Image (tube, grey):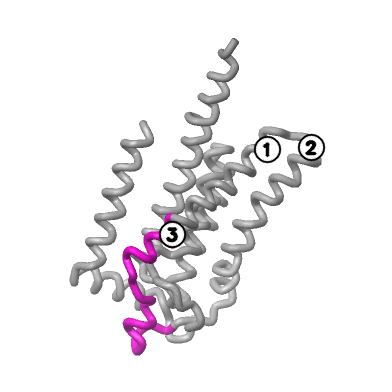
Amino acid sequence: MKLSAYFFRILILLSVIVLFTNSSYAQNWDINLLQNINPQNPNNNTFKTISNTAEPLCVAVPISMYALSLINNNQHLKKNAYQLVASLAVNAVATEGFKIIVNRDRPFVTYPNTVFPISTDEKNKSMPSGHTSFSFTTATSVYLMYPKWYVALPAFAWATSVGYSRMYLGLHYPSDVLMGAVVGSSSAIITNWARKNLINRKKKNLAKTP
């Protein structure tokens, strides 16, 4: 699929999610599902730990890949590390951009009596979930580089667990997590496409130059 066609479909999907969440039916669905997931005392250490792994792992994975590439003198692994960093950068811009555009408050701000957050320290906007988007960027990037089931299964299980933990902890609506998964995966796919079709094409053109 051409990038322009894929990008257009993603824009449509994101627009549908945003418009849907603004409807009264969707808002009721969103908060009702969140209330079923978020307990009054969200102190489960497993979910707190999973949520806290998002940022460290997103940093540790490309650093580890780069370090191993130097140790083994593996240029392909080094390029994969660069690609993952680029994917995370694209995702950071996209995530913050959508937070500004959508301008949605955290659920515990809108529903202070029915949503019970683990902490109220996170004051930035709610949609999309940044932890979820970065986790899915990392999982999708790694899978695109190494498309095996034994890579996909743990990678996406971890990313999905991060998304669920954000709802359990009362910090995001389900639609925030869904939006984060779409933005994160799309950032990885777009970066992977750019590497394969733009950079590699440029190298081929240079090789043909007499």
Q: Which of 202 and 163 is in front in this view?
A: 202
The residue beneath circle 2 is 72
Most extreme residue toward the left is 24
Quadrant showing the N terminus? top left
Q: How many marks overall?
A: 3
Q: Give the range drawn in magenta.
A: 94-116
What is the secondary structure assignment of the residue under circle 3? Answer: helix
The disc at residue 104 is none
- Find the distance from the CA under tag 1 to the CA under tag 3: 27 Å
Q: How crowded is mark 1: few (under 14 residues within 10 Å), some or many (20 or more)?
A: some
| Magenta stretch holds residue 123 | no
Q: Residue at x 54, y 57 (%)?
A: 158
**Relative to residue 43, is residue 174 drawn left or right?**
left
**Relative to residue 1, is residue 191 drawn left or right?**
right
Which badge, 2 or 1, comes first in the chain's sequence? 2
The residue beneath circle 1 is 77
The disc at residue 95 is 3
Q: Which residue is drawn at 57% across and 14% down?
A: 209
Which badge, 1 or 3, comes first in the chain's sequence? 1
**Residue 20: which quarter of the image?**
bottom left
Nearest-to-viewer mark from 3 and 2: 3
- Find the distance from the CA under tag 3 to the CA under tag 2: 34 Å
CB contact under 8 Å: marks 3 and 2: no
Residue 89 position, x and y percent, is: 53, 52
Residue 152 visible in the snapshot: no
Residue 137 position, x and y percent, is: 50, 51
Residue 98 position, x and y percent, is: 37, 60
Question: Which amino acid, by three-letter code, is at mark 1?
Answer: Leu
CB contact under 8 Å: marks 2 and 1: yes
| Magenta stretch holds residue 100 | yes
